[in-house]
Amino acid sequence: MDRYQSFARSGLGRFVVGRLGLPDPYPLRRHSPGKPPLDGPVLIGGGGRLADPVGAAVKSLGLDVVSGPAEGERYGALVFDASGIDSVERLRELYEFFQPVIRSLGPCGRVVVFGTPPERAESQIAQRALEGFTRSVGKELKRGGTAQLVHVEPGGEGAIGSTVRFLLSGRSAYVSGQVIRIGAAEVEAPSDADRPLTGKVALVTGAARGIGAAIAEVLGRDGATVVCLDVPAQGDELSAVANRVGGTALQLDITASDAPARIVEHLTQRHGGVDVVVHNAGITRDRTLGRMDAGRWDAVVAVNLASQERVNDALLAADALRPNGRIVGVSSIAGIAGNVGQTNYATTKAGVIGMVDSLSRRLAGRATVNAVAPGFIETRMTAAVPLFIREAGRRMNSLSQGGLPVDVAEAIAWFAHPASAGVNGNVVRVCGQSLLGA
Ligand SMILES: NC(=O)c1ccc[n+]([C@@H]2O[C@H](COP(=O)([O-])OP(=O)(O)OC[C@H]3O[C@@H](n4cnc5c(N)ncnc54)[C@H](O)[C@@H]3O)[C@@H](O)[C@H]2O)c1
């Protein structure tokens, strides 16, 4: 808990926060092995082609499902299949389901609306309208609640399980106001549901600290053998992470001309290939454009974008990415919204989105390519931001707090899940529904 959050939870703090209408950062419920995914039953409504698969996916998580509101009940989640809404008039069904029960959603509760990608739907207007509804609900929810819209393409009904598992649990604690797309795919169910990445090899760049270290830990927790990569100067911290997750350390500057070849060699010779590639290494060299020397521009482009393209090309040329592979980029809300002092950084982070768009199409059916776009995450990178800007960044989101590295890592573990074969071409913000770029 940050200091403001501790204050807001104290007796006096509650009073002051309530009276002045200040941000109230509720402590988020995060995933913890052995704990139920949510507090309380899941109320499911609506009826279309997704009702049965959604119900089955929710039940498979061990959650209680109820289909009608009960007096005094506190729900863990409210889930609505809106795929049957084929006219503007029928949008009223959303109102009729949610309005009476929205205030019965418990702390850190979940709202998930399922629909059809508008351009594939009978009523493009009605399906597009779901987005405004869901995003507004996300902004209205208090006490750590989140809301998302999931577009399921026709044929993708059987591919929703891993996404339901992510959204209806503390794994998605800092994800809100997102529109996720699931396509038609053959889904591989993991043999061990608690360690779905057993037998998989994952490469994580920039793994010595911060978000990268958390990604290595979460992928390791989920059963993957993790190859942790970072610059030689971070060697000690890198070894510590690799030992903690039972993986290997690869000391390498990803901008070096021989880096792609060395990565391919390490992965193929030591591990027989790779299943999950996470391009996390990134740097900032902030200056407004007029004051930015070419060195700052070049360094950021080299680390954050050019090296990733070269590594992808080398892995694909060597056929080192195994079937049902995963490539995950780490973008940023700065790449979506732009940011003062970050023309170089935002260029690269928007470029990561371009990588997702192009590669996800090129590799469709063989591998998925997605990205996370973190907002304000509590790391050394953000601790270095001046106090006033830092405090604004931390609070300007629907959850009124910064996220933790583990929140980004959990989203990546969802992309990496073997049953996420239909989750392709997504850029999912892990930003607590930040106002920036929304
Ligand atoms: N912290 C945030 O709020 C935030 C927000 C949005 C996006 N991101 C992105 O998340 C990623 C991780 O950020 P972080 O906050 O953990 O940063 P960090 O600075 O704590 O960690 C980055 C890691 O990348 C490594 N690295 C840098 N250059 C490298 C190179 N040439 N070769 C190999 N490794 C290299 C560093 O040594 C470091 O260990 C970055 O891509 C960053 O842009 C962070």
Image (spheres, rainbow, N blue to C red):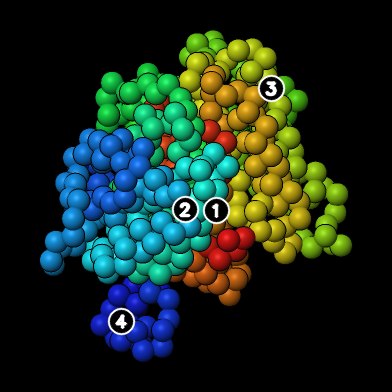
C-alpha span from label 2 to label 3: 45 Å
Amino acid tagged 2: Ser
Residue 356 visible in the picture: yes
C-alpha span from label 2 to label 1: 8 Å
Tell me the residue that label 3 is attached to: 313
The residue at label 1 has a CB less than 8 Å from ligand 1: no
Left-right relation of 344 to 185: right
Tell me the residue that label 4 is attached to: 14
Tell me the residue that label 2 is attached to: 87
Amino acid tagged 1: Ile
Residue 241 visible in the picture: no
Quadrant of the rendering where the N terminus is positioned: bottom left
Amino acid tagged 4: Arg
Q: In the image shown, does 290 or 245 lie closer to the viewer?
A: 290
Q: In the image shown, does 201 or 131 lie closer to the viewer?
A: 131
Name the residue located 85 percent from the left edge and 54 percent from the top edge: 293
